[in-house]
Image (cartoon, rainbow, N blue to C red):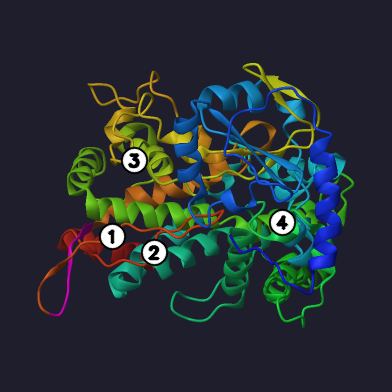
Amino acid sequence: MAPFVSVELASSIAAVSALALYISFRRDSRPVPPGPRPLPVIGNLLNIPDREQWLVYQDWSRQYGSDVVHLNVFGTDILVVNSAEAASALFGHKSAIYSDRPRMPMLGELVGLGWHFAFMPHGDEWRAHRKIFTQEFSPSAVQRYQDQELKWTKALLRNLVNAPQNFMEHIQNMASGIVLETTFGLQVQPSGQPDPFIAAAKQAVEAMTETGLFGTYLVDFLPVLKYVPAWFPYATFKRQANEWRKSSDIAAHVPFGILKDGMATNDYMPSVGSKLLTSDEAVDETAVRQTTAAMFASGSAATVSALTTFILAMRLYPDVQARAQKEIDQVVAGRLPNFADETSLPYITAIIREIGRWNPVVPLAFPHMLSSDDSYKGYHLKAGSVVFPNAWAILHDPVVYPDPHVFKPERFLTDDGKLNPEVKDPEAAWGFGRRSCPGRKMATSSMFIAVASVLAAFDISTAFDSDGSSITPPGEYGSGMLRYPKEFKCTIKPRSAEAAALISEAALE
C-alpha cells in the first residue's frame, strides 16, 4: 500500500475523517460479514496489506470462517468475496446490482485512465464501449484475426532461435504486434529495437497495475487529496500520476490519430479501427477511439503474463512439457501446429486452463461497487460497498482443485485424455458477471497457437550459471492488479534439426 499522509494535510484529512466518523456512528445495527476490528476514524486502513492482498484475504476467510470478509476505511465499506459459491450468488445471480465500479481518483482522474471502459461506471457510456469491443472480439469474430496471430507467433519462434535469453521481450513483441495490427493496422518494430507503441502500452499497463487496486493510494478513500499540488513535499503520488498520464494520453490518442491520417490519404491497412470508422452504422468517434485505445493499452497484458507463466511452468514441470510434446507429435507431423489442430490437442487446452488457474493474471479482480443494499447468508451488504472478487482464493480452493499450488493440467482431463466437463473451468481468471473480460476468446486463441507452436519446436530446460551450477527459478511474481513473473533464466533451444528447419521455413512465408 502507498498511502499519502502528511502534517501539512492534517486539517483536510481531519475534516474528511470527522465526516467519516459521523457516518460510522450512523451505521445501522444489522450484522456485516466478519473481518479485522477497525480503529476509530481510520477504520481498517492499517489492515490493508502492502502486497499480495489476495493471499491475506484468503487467510482472513479461513480465520473468520466466512467466504465474504468486511473492512471499513474512512467510512468506505469493502467486501472481499473468497469463494465460487459467493461469487456466483452475488456477481452471477445479482449481476444487476454488482456491475458498477467505484470512483478511483488515482487511476481515473489523476492518471487519466477514465476513458478505459474496464474502469467506467455501469451506464450507457460503458455499454456503448463494451458493445463495440464485444462485437469485434466475439467467439465467432476472432477467427478473422488468425492470420495475424499465426504471423506473430512465427515471429516469436524466429526470435527464440536468434536470442532465446530474451524470451520475455519476444513475448511482449508478439503480443503487442498482434493487438496493434488487428486494432489499428500498425506494425511494431522487430523485437530488440525500441518501439514507441510498445513503450506506451507497457507504461499504461504499469499504471493500471500500480493504481488499479482500489485503496492502494489514500486518495481513493479521500478524493480531496487529488487537489494537492504536485510540487508539495509529500505529494509523490501526484508526481507518479503525472508521469503515467503521459503514456495514458499516448495510448488514448496517438495510434488512432495515425490510423485516421492514413485513412485520409488511403494509406492504411484494414483493422478493427478502420472497419468501425467506415461502418454504415452511425458511430461515435470518441467511443471508437477510446475503445480501440483500451484494446491497445491492455490487450496484450494478459497474453504477456500468461505466456511468461507458461515458460516458467515448462521449466519447473518437465514432465508436463514431455506429455504435451508427445501429444503434439502424435497429431502434427512434419509441420507446425495450426488452429485446426486445437480440438485434437486437449492437453494443450488443459495447459492453458491451468496457466490461468495456477497464477492468474488478475488475482484480485477489478473492484465492483454494490449499487443497492443486499444480503448474503444473513449478513447485511451495504449499498456503495467496494466489492473485490478474490480470483486467487477461488482458483486455489483445494476442494475444487486438489493440490492447488501444483501445476497439473491433467486435472482438467478424463482418464482417457479428453477434456473433463466435470472439472470447473477456471473462468474466475477472466472476471465476473457483466464485467467479465470480453476479449477472453481472442486471448485464449493467441495462447493456443503460441503454446502449441513453442512446444512443437522447442525444449525449455535448465539454465546454468558461469560455474556450471543449475539455476532454479524462484517462481516469484510482482504484486499489483496485473501480475507478471519476475525475470528468470532458462534454456530454450530447438528440439531437433527438423524443428529448426520448420522455423526457418516459417520465416520465409
Q: Where's residue 29, x and y in %?
A: 76, 24
- Quadrant (top left, top right, bottom left, bottom right) of the C terminus: bottom left
Name the residue carrying label 4. 292
Please identify the dominant SS of the magenta region.
strand
Q: Earlier in the sequence, mark 4 or mark 1?
A: 4
Q: Say what secondary structure mark 3 lies in.
A: helix
Residue at image position (65%, 28%) is 91
- Give the numbered dot on residue 474: 1
Q: Earlier in the sequence, mark 3 or mark 1?
A: 3
Q: Earlier in the sequence, mark 3 or mark 4?
A: 4
For badge 3, the amino acid type reads: Ile
Q: Earlier in the sequence, mark 3 or mark 2?
A: 3
| Residue stretch rendered in magenta on the structure | 459-466
Relative to 72, residue 28 above or below: above
CB within 8 Å, label 1 to label 2: yes
For badge 4, the amino acid type reads: Thr
Residue at image position (75%, 33%) is 370
Q: Quadrant of residue 165?
A: bottom left
Q: Is residue 72 magenta?
A: no
Q: Say what secondary structure mark 4 lies in.
A: helix
CB within 8 Å, label 3 to label 1: no
Residue at image position (23%, 21%) is 415
- Give the numbered dot on residue 165: none
Name the residue carrying label 3. 351
* Cα–Cα gap, marks 4 and 1: 37 Å
CB within 8 Å, label 3 to label 4: no
Q: Where's residue 468, x and y in %?
A: 9, 74
* Cα–Cα gap, marks 3 and 1: 20 Å
- Choose mark 4 or mark 2, whichever is in front: 2
In the foreground, 212 or 188: 212
